[in-house]
Amino acid sequence: NDDDEDQEQEQEQETTTDFAKLDGDSVGKYVLVSKSQLPLDQCKAIEREFAFTGANGLLYRKCDDALREVVARHEQVHLRGYRGSGKSVSLAMLVLRERALGSLVVYLPRASHLVTRSSYQKHGEGEQEDLWDTPDAARVFLHAVAAEPNETLLGKIKTSDGKQTLLEIVKSGLEKGDQHVTQNAIDVVDELVKQKDVRVVFAFDEHNALYGPSDMHEVKGPRSRKNIHTDRLRLALKLRSCFPTANGGRYIACDSTTDVGSSNPVFKSEDENVFDFEIPKFNVAETYALLKHYEEVGKCSRGINKQIALEFKALTNGKVKEIQEYLMFQNA
């Protein structure tokens, strides 16, 4: 009933970590995330972790604290690392911290959805006649802008002409038809980039999907069709270089080495302003903290010690997903 739901929400709020206060003293500890801060469908690695443990805790790693300091110094940061090292979780942790500090964060956990699974149509105007609109992708982006944690800030931000709030523009765009919604999304990007009243942070996971082939094709003849590269998708092109630095804004990108596909390059920027940050695999200490957490929630046998953690690290090469799979097999 409603009383039970209210009580659950109060309990969740009481046990949620204040991400604005995380620092070096938090390293090695588990932080608690509420569903309102980061819906479970936002990041597959976090969704998998919460489903496995039945809890809402994430390990705050040394690299997460180092990333906090890097983002304080650099406007553009690119997260790199081996498959399974925890890049996506580190990006999500950064998103939670920036929102706790009052930033307007446009978080795209699956940028690949902007270049796949979308309807598409030729733009066909002037110099952009060879470019394509992606209406469904535009709506994915607008929903990311209008995420619940951003609503209050969006309602305070006036567009450059002073006529509407950015929240009104975004909601209007979500109601537009296929012919106009892509342009609306691009206009929203432009407004965010030059925003001076609020710190804007773009956080894009699967960022390299914006540089590879899409799943869209152009019919060239009765028996011929050609892949439409992301170089020809207007919104994808826009999001490659939307650096919101007017008010200390940040552009944080993270490449995927799994679901995006091998056909998409691991993007290497030639811009000297982009800081490459490596997310390492879990070390023995982090593996130990992880296993102790799993022990506490009943997903791992009792008696976890540093030697067992060392063995798990050697067995799985510090990949959380493989640790989970091993434990599921062991407990089957």
Image: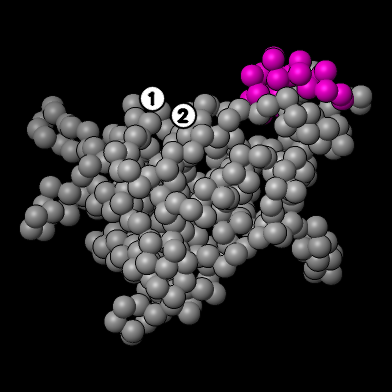
Q: Magenta region: which residues?
A: 304-324
The x and y percentages for residue 5 are 79, 64
Which of the two residues, 240 or 115, is positioned nearer the viewer here? 240
Percent x, y for residue 82? 52, 26
Q: Residues within 10 Å of mark 2 (few under 14, many from 20)?
A: some
For the question of whether residue 308 can be seen, the reply is yes
How far is the residue under mark 2 from the one under mark 1? 8 Å
Judging depth in this view, the residue of 94 and 55 nearest the camera is 94
Q: Nearer the viewer, residue 134 or 100?
A: 100
Image quadrant containing the N terminus:
bottom right
Query: Residue 322's mark?
Result: none
Coordinates of residue 47 in the picture (x, y in percent):
64, 42
Does 196 appear in magenta? no
Q: Secondary structure at mark 2?
A: loop
Q: Which residue is mark 1?
A: 262
Please give the count of numbered marks on the rendered protein: 2
The residue most toward the bottom is: 163
Residue 70, x across and y down, in percent: 52, 48
Whether residue 182 sits left or right of residue 328 in the image: it is: left
Residue lying at 58% horizontally and 50% vertically, measured from the top left: 68
Q: Quadrant of the C terminus?
A: top right
Above or below residue 239? Residue 255 is: above
Q: Which mark is residue 257?
A: 2
Q: Is residue 245 left or right of residue 186?
A: right
Q: Secondary structure at mark 1?
A: loop
